[in-house]
Image (cartoon, coloured by chain):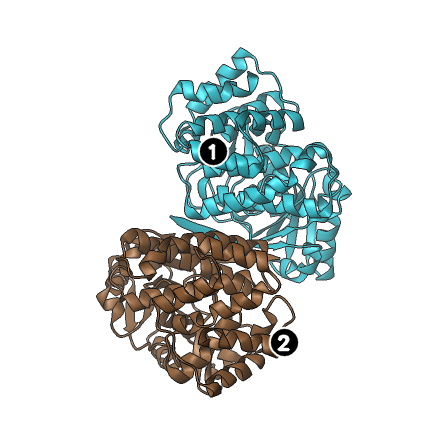
Chain colours: A brown, B cyan
Amino acid sequence: MEFYMPTKVYHEKDAVLNHASEIAAIGKKALIVTGKSSSKKNGSLADVKKALEENGTEYIVFNEIEENPSIATVMKAAEIGRSQGTDFVIGVGGGSPMDASKAIALMIYNRDSSEEVLYQKIDLKALPVVEVPTTCGTGSEVTPYAILTRDDKKTKQSISHKIYPVIACVDAKYLMNAPKSVIVNTAIDALGHFIESYFNKRATDYSCMLCQYGMSVWAENLDVLLGEDITEERCNSLLLASTLAGMAITHTGTSIPHGMSYYLTYNMNIPHGKAVGMFLPGYLKLMSKQFEDEVAMILEGLGFANIEQFAFFIKQCMEVCELSKTDKQNILNEIMENPGKMASIPFEVSESDVREVVEFMGK
Amino acid sequence: MEFYMPTKVYHEKDAVLNHASEIAAIGKKALIVTGKSSSKKNGSLADVKKALEENGTEYIVFNEIEENPSIATVMKAAEIGRSQGTDFVIGVGGGSPMDASKAIALMIYNRDSSEEVLYQKIDLKALPVVEVPTTCGTGSEVTPYAILTRDDKKTKQSISHKIYPVIACVDAKYLMNAPKSVIVNTAIDALGHFIESYFNKRATDYSCMLCQYGMSVWAENLDVLLGEDITEERCNSLLLASTLAGMAITHTGTSIPHGMSYYLTYNMNIPHGKAVGMFLPGYLKLMSKQFEDEVAMILEGLGFANIEQFAFFIKQCMEVCELSKTDKQNILNEIMENPGKMASIPFEVSESDVREVVEFMGK
């Protein structure tokens, strides 16, 4: 087994400002990669700018990252980064800007390459990347993954290159005023990372440690997901869980709930965490066929008596959508043709086993 | 809080050979740093040589590292490494060669510096270091520490520079035929790392996670420490615990049992793990003054009903030596003048509290 997690994580209040000189010293000119508005509202963008300004490091801001970022947007940002002579990248926001920042760092470094290299299995380097998460689900601040929308394949997929951020600055204050739906959806994404990493063919002692501890942290926040007001302590707890989950999937990858979610997001525009959550009860049900005791232990640790209670919780904290027969069949077809995700299932399964995962929440 | 653990860990059978090309590609000429004989006997040195030879990477072997390595030995090895043009270092063995290899890598890189820089608080780089542990205690394969004997201060102390190994190859086969006393002493050292990291002012969620999971792994091996025959599975388990403990103290440092142990090792030549073990029951007793429930939980997780039973276990698995009044007083004086170790205690303590830690095992 392998353990590799080279990202330096600063999880503290004012992490960006406290470590400003270290961040600013990474290069001479930063490309800050973010979305349209939330990083302005929650103060993260201002902190990053201040950190760079205080240390005399130049920067430009690219704020056009959309949810589920496209390759076109990545290439547009990379073109600007290339022409402006940026030598490191800072991703600020949720999974979309953080994932995009890695792909952009790759495309700036490989300045003569075109977008085809994103999904080529060759060994390419990237500019150094710093990540500043403002949601509590993706864990992208510590993963080497960069998931982009592939219109050519009508789905989402991580690029072929592993780009580990050099620094992650995790600060609860950016999450405090996030919309409730964002907190819930991203927290469910993190839970998906734990469940899919724990029950995974590639699971190791290291990934199981991260999942076990991380789920106990995550479970402290059930009441927030069901409507209680968020506090700074809870933001810290949700962010810690999210980072730990990111470290776990760094070692195992995700499994079929994530693989199935991409269809819903690509075709029905369902937010990522919600799309993942729809398949988690079914995945646990499938896992219980081989790992009954472990599924029961995980559910107990999370605060649920059984899978049905867990499924009810998912429905309680987010609106689960109805899937048509066609959608279900399409999801099944797509996942059955995804060898990477299918290989992550820790035992032999049939197509009808997988169908049950798709259908569980519909029942 | 911070998490930083950049070492790539390969924990598997034949780790050195499986990752030979990656190791060999680190440089053009390796300095292999090891002790007199055990790395020859257990096969680790042969594997490292083979890995380099197969990939056409040159090497020289320095096999003069003694237990509790001296600065003179480090400088002798560094001089050879400098004159022979070595550009990376591979430490093979227990804590002594692994710790020494980091200091040697520092002194080769800073070729015009003299030994004074080892303990100067300045920012110095080192050659890349690979570690191949053959005992199950130090965790040096993942820590940035390099503890050397300081004759000028009549004690042991880590150098001032943090040198994280780039790769650690953990392979149970090297431990299989180690002397029983080495397995016991080093396993008790690892337990000390867990206990002193868990009950530590610098403890974080990350370090606590490593300790909690790691202690549950460690506790699987109580019977081996009490005389049962070792198996490959147990070697893997003890090595995993040791690496996890190393990751934990990387984030917190150790506490007063380690600080107290140096006197016994320097003055009475008591092996490191045994010297640490003598103060662990007393440290838990001290911790129970503030953290009664947590101490009880930790003891239960380790398989002990109370501190007395734990102290009995320590006596059972290794011969605890009698300390004279003078020795006890000297140990107390030395630790009270060690601000780093004293600051690691998670609450205010008096001199008489610390005296009880020294005296507990003598009673």
Q: Nearer the viewer, residue B290 or B160?
A: B290
Q: Could you tell me the amino acid type at mark 1?
A: Val
Residue positioned 49% across, 72% down in the render? A257
Left or right: A192 with respect to B228?
left
Task: From the top left corner, tell me how far across and down residue B178 is, in percent.
Answer: 73, 39
Q: Nearer the viewer, residue B331 or B123?
A: B331
Q: Which residue is mark 1?
A: B295
Task: From the top left corner, tell me how far across and down residue A162 is, in percent.
Answer: 51, 68
Which class describes the residues within 10 Å of circle 2: few (<14), some (14-19), or many (20+)? few
Q: Chain of mark 1?
A: B
Q: Is residue B124 above or below residue A310?
A: above
Closer to the eye: label 2 or 1: 2
Q: Quadrant of the N terminus of chain A?
A: bottom right
Q: Chain of mark 2?
A: A
Task: From the top left corner, tell me how far across and down residue B134 is, in percent.
Answer: 67, 43
Where residue B101 sits, quadrant-wise, is top right
Work out whether disc 2 and disc 1 sit on a shared chain.
no
Cα distance between the residues tagged 2 and 1? 48 Å
Left or right: B229 with respect to B118?
right
Residue positioned 52% across, 49% down in the render? B164
Q: Which element is circle 1 on?
A: helix
Q: Which mark is residue A185?
A: none
Q: Nearer the viewer, residue A172 or B160?
A: A172
Q: Is residue B274 above or below residue A349?
A: above
Residue positioned 47% across, 19% down in the render? B356
Q: Could you tell me the amino acid type at mark 2?
A: Ser
Which class describes the residues within 10 Å of circle 1: few (<14), some (14-19), or many (20+)? many
Q: Which element is circle 2 on?
A: loop
Left or right: A246 with respect to A2?
left
Task: From the top left corner, tell me how far across and down residue B248 is, in percent.
Answer: 50, 44
Q: Is residue B34 in sight in this rendering? A: yes
Q: Which residue is mark 2?
A: A350
